[in-house]
Image: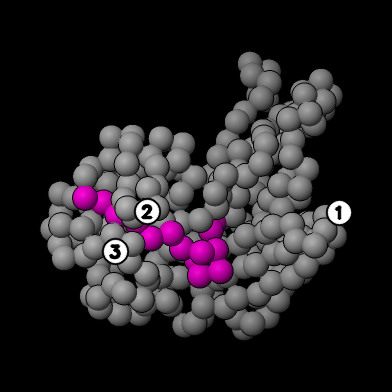
């Protein structure tokens, strides 16, 4: 884009850094946000059954995840679980789960699964479609139990700062409320150190005409949480304020 060989970049916002190259900006969030929740996907060929609650799983369940954010929040909920590293795209991880007897479960984003055509059959508690292996069931984490990463489920449109024509196109594509929620989350992450390795989660949603931002970070031996509310016009300030609360709590 800076070389003017492209006018627009489309991103999964959870992968877009908070500090963009000079001359570029996040101009819009394309439509409403997809499902922000994380999903525990587990095999049912090892004694587990579909439609289990988090409290139903036995101690010692081995959950494969490459995300420090997910690992930290999971072990805060179930310190009796075990975790193991895993890498690869969604289908690679699902096949690794089924191929390695030492693994019982993994955690993936609901939005990514849905975009691959993988469906949740709630009545059966099973995954179907998209070429997923058989005998995989799921438990969906409520956001209050496992906060997603910043921007999860949102699609961002990035343009050159001075490109008025593209800015007008993005304005028509933008979902204003979602953009302000994502702005609060990204402001929070930037104030926390941007690309730091600290496990951080954040989720902002509009409630009662205001943005409600909930956050989590693992700054000390314990998981710290903080939240706040503001008008939609104060999204960036809200992110900074909540980050300051968390940083003070971690001192």
Question: Quick one: label 2 or label 3, which is nearer the N terminus?
Answer: 3
Residue shown at 28% from the left, 35% from the top: 131
For the stretch drawn in magenta, the main secondary structure is loop
Residue 63, quarter of picture: bottom left
* One can see residue 65 in this view: no
Task: Give the quarter of the figure containing the N terminus.
Answer: top right
Mark-to-mark CA distance, 2 and 3: 24 Å
Residues marked 1 and 3 touching at CB (< 8 Å): no
What residue sits right under mark 2 in the picture?
123
Mark-to-mark CA distance, 1 and 3: 40 Å
Vertical comparison of 154 with 167: above or below = below
Residue shown at 79% from the left, 28% from the top: 172
Task: Give the quarter of the figure containing the C terminus.
Answer: bottom right
Nearer to us: label 2 or label 3: 2
Using the image as rendered, state which of residue 170 and residue 192 is in the foreground: 170
Residue shown at 60% from the left, 62% from the top: 202
**What percent of the width, then of the height, locates residue 138?**
34, 56
What residue sits right under mark 3 in the picture?
63
**What percent of the width, then of the height, locates residue 12?**
55, 40
Residue 243 counted in the magenta span: no
* One can see residue 201 in this view: yes
For disc 1, the neighbor class at 10 Å (few under 14, some 14 to 19, many from 20) is few
Mark-to-mark CA distance, 2 and 1: 41 Å
What residue sits right under mark 1 in the picture?
233
Boundaries of the magenta span: 135-149
Using the image as rendered, state which of residue 150 and residue 247 is in the foreground: 150
Residue shown at 37% from the left, 69% from the top: 53
């Amino acid at each position: 884009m800076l070389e003017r060989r492209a006018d627009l970049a489309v991103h999964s916002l959870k992968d877009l850094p908070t500090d963009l190259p000079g001359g570029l900006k996040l101009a819009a969030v394309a439509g409403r946000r997809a499902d922000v929740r994380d999903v525990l996907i587990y095999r049912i060929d090892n004694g587990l059954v579909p439609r289990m609650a988090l409290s139903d799983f036995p101690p010692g369940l081995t959950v494969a995840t490459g995300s420090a954010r997910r690992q930290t929040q999971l072990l805060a909920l179930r310190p009796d679980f075990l975790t193991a590293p895993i890498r690869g795209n969604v289908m690679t991880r699902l096949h690794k789960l089924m191929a390695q007897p030492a693994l019982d479960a993994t955690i993936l984003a609901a939005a990514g699964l849905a975009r691959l055509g993988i469906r949740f059959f709630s009545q059966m508690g099973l995954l179907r479609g998209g070429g997923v292996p058989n005998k995989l069931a799921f438990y969906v984490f409520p956001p209050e139990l496992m906060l997603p990463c910043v921007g999860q489920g949102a699609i961002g449109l990035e343009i050159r700062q001075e490109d008025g024509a593209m800015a007008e196109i993005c304005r028509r594509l933008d979902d204003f409320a979602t953009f302000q929620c994502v702005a609060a989350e990204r402001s929070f992450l930037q104030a926390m150190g941007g690309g730091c390795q600290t496990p951080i989660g954040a989720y902002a949603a509009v409630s009662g005409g205001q943005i409600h931002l909930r956050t989590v970070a693992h700054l000390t031996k314990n998981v710290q949480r903080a939240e706040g509310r503001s008008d939609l016009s104060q999204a960036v300030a809200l992110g900074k304020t909540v980050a300051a609360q968390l940083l003070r709590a971690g001192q």
